[in-house]
Image (cartoon, rainbow, N blue to C red):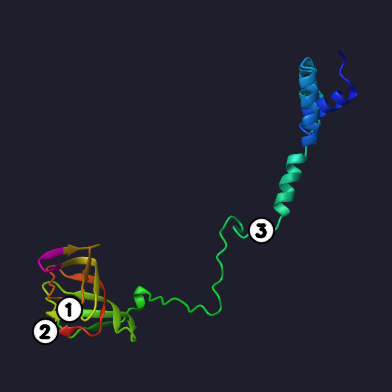
Amino acid sequence: MMPDEDFNLLAALQALDTLDESERRALAEKLQASPELQSELAAFETAISAIAYTAPAVPVAPDLKNRLLQRIAELPPTAESVNSQPIVASPPDNNPPSLIVRSQNVKWKPYSVPGISIGKLYIDKKKRQITCLMRLEPGVTFPMHRHADSEEVFVLEGDLIVEGEVCYQGDYIRSVPGSTHSPVTQGGCLLLIKSSTNNEMLV
């Protein structure tokens, strides 16, 4: 039995995977009525798949790569980079500048306790907090005091003994509101401190 023209068309469309739903049903009916047409359908699919391999090779222009690179180089810079460097977005006009205190500009002053000097970095008048550097000479004891708020101390140099614990460079101490202590240093130290201006001296 020779397949009819309708089957040939449906088989070709099936091989190209372009059948719509009604055409799929029509093809299924023809295959059900004549199962021998399955071999004809397979032949169509084989022929279609071979078409791509029979197409002639398209020669590539020898300067194609250079032209592509030239086009890429002419594209405007993206938001991600300019000259291989990330673009830093400008802050909005209403963005206040950061406070930067250079180490050489810290103004050191004697503290109320002999052997201690203080370099103020920032005072928050609303929160009643001070951020400062404090230098203690060897053997100095800081007077007993009560913390009005949380206090944070970072040891930059030397040693600081707090409640029997010896803290060294890189150590961090946080005291809670209402706590009291009287730190001492053996060899001297340099501290970064954030504390309340309402602390109460107990001696």
Quarter assignment of residue 82? bottom right
Residue 63: image location, x then y, percent: 77, 39
Marking on residue 111: none
Vertically, is 96 above or below 34?
Answer: below
Residue 194: image location, x then y, percent: 27, 75
Element at badge 3? loop
Marking on residue 202: 2
Give the magenta range.
161-166
Q: Are marks 3 and 1 in contact (CB under 8 Å)?
A: no
Q: Residue furthest top?
A: 1
Mark 2 or mark 3, which has the lower sequence index? 3
Q: Is residue 67 magenta?
A: no
Three-letter amino acid code of the residue under disc 1: Gly
Element at badge 1? loop
Q: Are marks 2 and 3 in contact (CB under 8 Å)?
A: no
Residue 173: image location, x then y, percent: 21, 68
Mark 3 or mark 1, which has the lower sequence index? 3
Most frequent secondary structure within the magenta stretch:
strand
Q: Quadrant of the N terminus?
A: top right
Q: Is residue 20 visible to the viewer in this orientation of the structure?
A: no
What's the CA distance linking mark 2 and mark 3? 64 Å
Residue sitting at x 34%, y 83%? 124
Three-letter amino acid code of the residue under disc 3: Pro
Residue sitting at x 78%, y 21%? 31
The residue tagged 1 is 178
- Specify whether 46 is left or right of 162: right
The residue tagged 3 is 77
Identify which residue, 114 or 40, lies in the foreground.
40
